[in-house]
């Protein structure tokens, strides 16, 4: 048995029917509303064939080309995060009867989701969030259940956008772990690697052949090429971690705060940000209420509100919290870095603030 | 906000009135649209005055008066003072009641120009401007003490029902403090400013509308008023970079919530100049 | 640990007594409805619970041990500050709330054995240290001298008066009160002073080098207490304080309580002074 297999494009529909037959809802990148985003997919033709994207600070554009690839773009608008740590969900419900008795009930969904096409950076994002919601002092049963029910087909990169910087963080645009299958798209299909028994079963079902030496070389060259397309540079991450915390009063914090809208587009598009708030949504009669968990942002002015005091009322403290947390204190908290270099915070910042530039200014 | 802790004495079965001032009735409709919920609400409160829905008893003593609309005339002033005197709590709803609404654009003009507008707006010669009456459209809070406020143009059904429910639970209604961008990102809406170069006020405007415009591919126009934190300088710099002139930027904010204090730096200059 | 399954969902508890302590401070005495939880539940002094007010939300409140030392009972003293606590003010005996916990680190009760113990609190900072004080008094022979210093705006703000009187009359224990706003009137029960809590340092009559200081109050107060006690000879590692930041989840997931690398909810709230000295010195961290 070879380490690499080849799945022709013509077998995509078989992959999708395998998922359907095994009770998975399959999500894949699709061309929707001017962006490439994860959405349910039923047929191979639903994939964004030929679409490429251009991402720059505060800029996102997609174009249809003659490119015969389904995954010719870089990263989807949002990461896999919303499938595991939902933007808004009911975590528990409580009913109150006439006597005032409260009946609490945990809410956990059991949907099985297969994701077809997870970029290596987003895969690392999942691994990082696992450390927050699973491999931590406390576990979130909702997150764990979804992880258990998830099937991941990783998609190595054949191209990078202007804001990509996984290489500058010491990573590479190739999936290294945390997948069931990892694919690299070449001309007429995918070179595949197995990451788990679940992935092995899918490959057996597909009855595919081993990849040829030329196909494998082509795939690996494409990945190297994607890595070489990245131009952003950062000091070694350990140095960044130390210097950010050593420069908490740097004048650059004031400068970036004057440009920053504090809109939270960066944190809300980040694959690793986990801040959330909780809130009650009662029914009109007041007999029942749903307790929700929804994404929050350290850029929200109320994020640090405690007992009558707002600790980070000044926007420079909010920006500093985001950057120092993501690129420094995260290490102490979760034994890993907090950024995967997907570049979404740069692309989706309406005022083009580039974290890499800000870090380089402060760490100079 | 006044003393919401007094809600401790809020009646078990409160009397509620809904009043209209100068407005389009859209906020009242938000309450009527979901008829089932309104009927449910009516089983636990007494709705004593709500002209749009039926009951009429304008100056009844109530626990909660819900006010839609802005104050435009001496008669309005008299009415709102009466309403306030008879209500334990006042909840202002909608852009008109909170900032004067779209009609408060008249505050930027003079009587001569206003007559010109009247001619443009109404199909035939209609005398809506009364000689010697108030020269401005102002929020409810400019005339009487307001306990709670809900922004929006119009407010939405979930928002008003939730606010009433919270008051019934004895707490002040939760405020929307975050910008519209929050909802867009939560809902997976591709940013219209980044991806389509649409000028959008979302980064400085309060959430609460469920990002209805960006979801349709358009920029936010600011119906819910300013977000709790709004970096207006950065927003204006962005709009300029997108190619909008000073005049166009001013007009962006000269709209539904033109009198909101946060927008003053942009709107204070008069339109006519 | 109590929660191995779902740490997000509260458990039903009944208010066995609602006590109004002051015009905007109240105490709820609680017990769990579920008999198994009721028999298993225990907490360490300094830990907190998340208290859920039906239909509105949760708040993090430190646990006060039951005033009657009744098994399966615990208390929370709450000051009206925000939306949730304002609403909770109208709870009554017999009402149900949700409770999950206990969370966070605790006071160094074991480390303090054989040492003099100084409890320094300000405002409602006395609540998080009631359980620690009671533990010293229940194991009186295992600890050295006990000094309880409490600072308040004015005398009429004093809660827990019966408790303070009992403490003051316990062996080798002194209660000392300081008021910041007005001259206190001697109530004949314990000492009063106008000024800051640290004004009592010279007259504590303790072995500072062999003492443990536990303090809760506004951050500037705790920092001043730490500095002054260290100056008087207390070892920095033996000065402990309890921090407060917004908490939505209490389990290190929601991100609100972060202070540098710390999640106050699970890494704190009780810290040795050297562990948080630098973090507290940075404005807006």
Image: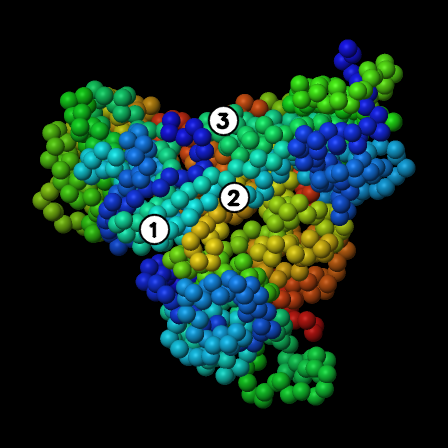
* Pointer 1 residue: A100
Query: Which residue extends farthest top?
Result: A1
Residue plotted at (57% across, 80% down)? B135
Neighbour tally class for label 2: few under 14, some 14-19, many 20 plus, Cα within 10 Å: many
Residue plotted at (20% across, 35% down)? C70
- Percent x, y of residue C240: 32, 29
Tag 3, which secondary structure? loop
* Pointer 2 residue: A90
Give the label, 2 or 1, closer to the camera.
1
Tag 1, which secondary structure? loop
In the rendered structure, the residue with mark 2 lies on which chain?
A
Is residue A276 or residue C117 the one in the foreground? A276
| Spatial CA span between label 3 and label 1 | 35 Å
Left or right: A165 in relation to A81: right
Which of marks 1 and 2 precedes in the sequence?
A: 2
Q: Is residue C37 above or below residue B196?
A: above
* Pointer 3 residue: A136
Residue plotted at (61% across, 49% down)? B183
Is residue C148 or residue C99 the one in the foreground? C99
Q: Are marks 2 and 3 in contact (CB under 8 Å)?
A: no
- Percent x, y of residue C87: 36, 54
Work out which quarter of the rendered image holds the C terminus of chain A and state it: top right
Query: Which residue extends farthest left?
Result: C188
| Spatial CA span between label 2 and label 3 | 22 Å
Which of marks 3 and 2 precedes in the sequence?
A: 2
In the rendered structure, the residue with mark 1 lies on which chain?
A
| Spatial CA span between label 2 and label 1 | 22 Å
């Amino acid at each position: 048995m070879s380490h690499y297999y080849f799945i022709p494009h013509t077998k995509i529909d078989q992959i999708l029917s395998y998922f359907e037959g095994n009770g998975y809802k399959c999500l894949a990148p699709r061309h929707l509303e001017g962006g490439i985003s994860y959405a349910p997919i039923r047929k191979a033709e639903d994939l964004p064939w030929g679409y490429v994207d251009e991402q720059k600070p505060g800029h996102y554009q997609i174009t249809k080309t003659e490119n015969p690839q389904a995954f010719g773009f870089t990263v989807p608008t949002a990461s896999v995060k919303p499938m595991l740590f939902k933007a808004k969900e009911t975590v528990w419900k409580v009913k109150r009867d006439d006597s005032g008795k409260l009946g609490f009930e945990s809410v956990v969904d059991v949907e099985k989701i297969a994701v077809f096409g997870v970029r290596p950076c987003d895969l690392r994002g999942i691994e990082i969030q696992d450390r927050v919601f699973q491999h931590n002092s406390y576990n979130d049963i909702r997150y764990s259940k979804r992880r258990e029910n998830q099937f991941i087909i990783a998609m190595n990169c054949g191209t990078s956008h202007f804001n990509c910087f996984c290489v500058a963080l010491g990573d590479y645009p190739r999936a290294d772990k945390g997948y069931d299958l990892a694919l690299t798209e070449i001309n007429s299909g995918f070179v595949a690697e197995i990451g788990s028994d679940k992935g092995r079963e899918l490959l057996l079902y597909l009855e595919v052949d081993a990849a040829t030496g030329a196909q494998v070389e082509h795939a690996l060259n494409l990945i190297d090429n994607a890595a070489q397309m990245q131009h952003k540079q950062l000091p070694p991450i350990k140095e960044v971690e130390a210097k950010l915390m050593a420069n908490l009063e740097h004048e650059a914090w004031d400068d970036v705060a004057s440009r920053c809208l504090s809109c939270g587009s960066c944190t809300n598009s980040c694959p690793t940000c986990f801040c959330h708030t909780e809130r009650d949504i009662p029914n009109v009669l007041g007999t029942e209420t749903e307790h929700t968990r929804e994404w929050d942002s350290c850029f929200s002015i109320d994020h640090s509100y405690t007992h009558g005091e707002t600790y980070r009322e000044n926007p420079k403290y909010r920006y500093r919290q985001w950057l120092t947390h993501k690129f420094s204190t995260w290490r102490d908290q979760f034994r890993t870095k907090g950024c995967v270099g997907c570049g979404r915070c740069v692309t989706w910042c309406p005022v083009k603030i580039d974290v890499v530039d800000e870090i380089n200014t402060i760490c100079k | 906000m006044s003393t919401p802790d007094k809600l401790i004495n809020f009646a078990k079965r409160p009397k509620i009135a809904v009043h209209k001032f100068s407005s389009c009735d859209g906020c009242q409709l938000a309450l009527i649209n979901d008829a089932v919920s309104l009927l449910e609400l009516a089983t636990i409160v007494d709705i004593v005055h709500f002209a749009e829905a039926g009951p009429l008893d304008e100056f009844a003593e109530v626990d909660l008066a819900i006010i839609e609309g802005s104050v435009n005339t001496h008669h309005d002033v008299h009415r709102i003072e009466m309403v306030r005197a008879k209500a334990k709590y006042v909840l202002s709803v909608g852009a008109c009641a909170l900032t004067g609404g779209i009609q408060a654009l008249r505050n930027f003009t003079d009587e001569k120009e206003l007559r010109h507008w009247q001619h443009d707006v109404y199909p035939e010669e209609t005398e809506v401007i009364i000689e010697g009456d108030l020269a401005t459209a102002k929020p409810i809070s400019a005339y009487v003490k307001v306990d709670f406020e809900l922004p929006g143009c119009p407010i939405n059904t979930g928002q008003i029902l939730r606010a009433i429910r919270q008051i019934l639970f004895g707490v002040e209604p939760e405020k929307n403090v975050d910008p519209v961008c929050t909802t867009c990102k939560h809902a997976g809406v591709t940013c219209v400013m980044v991806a389509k170069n649409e000028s959008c006020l979302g980064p400085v405007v309060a959430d609460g509308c469920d990002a209805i415009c960006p979801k349709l591919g358009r920029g936010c126009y600011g119906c819910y008023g300013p977000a709790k934190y709004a970096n207006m300088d950065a927003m204006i710099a962005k709009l300029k970079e997108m190619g909008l002139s000073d005049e166009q930027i001013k007009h962006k904010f000269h709209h539904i919530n033109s009198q909101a204090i946060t927008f003053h730096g942009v709107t204070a200059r008069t339109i006519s100049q | 640990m109590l929660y191995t399954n779902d740490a997000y969902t509260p458990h039903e508890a009944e208010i066995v007594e609602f006590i109004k302590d002051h015009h905007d401070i109240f105490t709820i005495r609680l017990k769990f409805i579920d008999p198994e939880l009721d028999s298993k539940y225990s907490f360490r002094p300094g830990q907190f619970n998340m208290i859920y007010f039906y239909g509105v939300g949760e708040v993090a409140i430190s646990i006060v041990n039951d005033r009657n030392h009744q098994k399966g009972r615990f208390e929370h003293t709450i000051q009206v500050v925000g939306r949730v606590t304002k609403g909770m003010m109208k709870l009554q005996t017999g009402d149900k709330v949700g409770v999950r916990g206990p969370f966070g680190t605790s006071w160094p009760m074991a480390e303090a054995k054989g040492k003099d113990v100084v409890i320094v609190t300000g405002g409602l900072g006395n609540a998080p240290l009631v359980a620690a004080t009671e533990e010293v008094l229940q194991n009186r022979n295992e600890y050295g001298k006990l000094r309880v210093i409490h600072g308040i705006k004015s005398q009429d703000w004093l809660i827990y008066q019966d408790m303070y009187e009992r403490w003051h009359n316990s062996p080798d224990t002194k209660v000392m009160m300081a008021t910041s706003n007005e001259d206190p009137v001697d109530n004949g029960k314990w000492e009063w002073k106008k000024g800051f809590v640290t004004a009592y340092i010279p007259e504590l009559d303790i072995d500072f080098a062999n003492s443990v200081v536990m303090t809760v109050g506004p951050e500037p107060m705790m920092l001043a207490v730490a500095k002054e006690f260290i100056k008087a000879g207390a070892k920095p590692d033996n000065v402990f304080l309890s921090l407060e930041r917004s908490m939505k989840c209490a389990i290190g997931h929601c991100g609100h309580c972060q202070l540098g690398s710390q999640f106050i909810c699970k890494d704190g709230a009780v810290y040795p002074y050297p562990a948080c000295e630098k973090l507290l010195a940075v404005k807006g961290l």
